Image (spheres, rainbow, N blue to C red):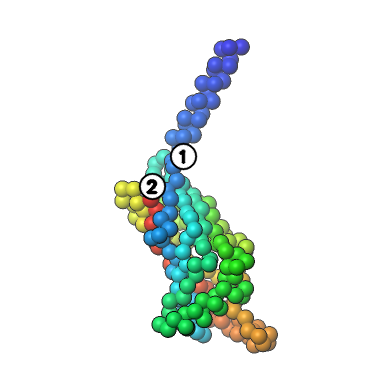
């Protein structure tokens, strides 16, 4: 009995050791140096701006390759930058906070759960696949990211298009008929919000 117990304990310790060698500590997002830039295009009064992160991490394999991660974006930090006038920016920011857009009062966080990251050939480009949740609505998303790692820091950049329709990001007006017409036209002309990621990860 003692022999069996000892053998079982040794096997458990070996499995734990193997597991530890396969999983590396997560790299953490530098929330002070990272941001998301967005641009709705110039059609029909388009705007541009940014929002910030609350947290983020990437898990790496024993071979040093990123494999998965989770990022949380602070939707209360959303700001417009296209209008040079402060009053104009505040008006745009107030519109962005409405339920028809990002509704941060009800949905203060947006999340990106990265399920899989695959290096493209031998380049610094990676195919990224995961689930993006905005306003409580989750949809799968895929894009290409460039990950430039030096020593204990990774600089990650990517361009992503976010669908107005999939995440219910359509501007509304008081006139219902006009709303339907404008939404349909806008969705056809500018179906996406163009997003640029600029992230700094630290080991």
User: How many numbered tags mark residues here?
Assistant: 2
Does residue 43 appear anywhere in the picture?
A: no
Q: Residue at x 43, y 54 (%)?
A: 29
Please tell me whether mark 1 or mark 2 is closer to you in this view: 2
Is 123 placed left or right of 75 in the picture?
left
* 19 relative to 28, above or below: above
Q: Secondary structure at mark 2?
A: loop
Within 10 angstroms of label 2, few (less than 14), some, or many (20 or more) residues? few
Residue 165 lies in what quarter of the image?
A: bottom right
Residue 44 numbered mark, or none: none
Name the quadrant of the N terminus: top right
User: Along the line of sight, which residue is nearer the eye, 65 or 134?
Assistant: 134
Q: Residue at x 49, y 58 (%)?
A: 54
**Residue 169, percent across and down?**
58, 73
**Residue 103, percent across and down?**
59, 70
Does residue 28 appear anywhere in the picture?
A: yes
Q: CA distance from mark 1 to mark 2?
A: 14 Å
> Which is more N-terminal, label 2 or label 1?
1
User: Along the line of sight, which residue is nearer the eye, 26 or 94?
Assistant: 94
Q: Name the residue that disc number 2 marks.
A: 203
Q: Name the residue that disc number 1 marks.
A: 23
Dots 1 and 2: beta carbons under 8 Å?
A: no
User: Along the line of sight, which residue is nearer the eye, 51 or 126?
Assistant: 51
Is 138 placed left or right of 90 in the picture?
right
**Residue 7, percent across and down?**
54, 17
Q: Secondary structure at mark 1?
A: loop
* 29 relative to 134, above or below: above
**Residue 199, percent across and down?**
40, 59
Q: Residue at x 45, y 50 (%)?
A: 58
* 192 relative to 56, above or below: below
Q: Residue at x 47, y 83 (%)?
A: 87
């Amino acid at each position: 009995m003692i022999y069996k117990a000892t053998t079982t304990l040794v096997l458990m310790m070996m499995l734990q050791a193997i597991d530890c060698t396969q999983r590396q500590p997560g790299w953490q997002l530098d929330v002070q140096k990272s941001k998301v830039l967005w641009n709705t295009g110039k059609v029909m009064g388009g705007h541009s701006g940014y929002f910030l992160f609350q947290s983020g991490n990437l898990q790496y394999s024993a071979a040093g390759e990123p494999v998965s991660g989770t990022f949380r974006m602070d939707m209360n930090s959303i700001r417009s930058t296209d209008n040079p006038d402060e009053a104009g920016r505040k008006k745009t920011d107030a519109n962005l906070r409405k339920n028809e857009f990002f509704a941060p009062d009800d949905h203060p966080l947006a999340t990106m759960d990265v399920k899989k990251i695959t290096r493209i050939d031998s380049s610094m480009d990676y195919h990224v696949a995961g689930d993006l949740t905005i306003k409580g609505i989750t949809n799968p998303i895929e894009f290409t990211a460039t990950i430039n790692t030096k020593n204990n820091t990774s600089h990650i950049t990517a361009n992503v298009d976010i669908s107005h329709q999939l995440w219910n990001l359509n501007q509304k007006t008081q006139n219902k008929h006009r709303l339907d017409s404008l939404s349909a036209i806008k969705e056809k002309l500018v179906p996406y919000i163009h997003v640029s990621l600029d992230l700094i990860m630290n080991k």
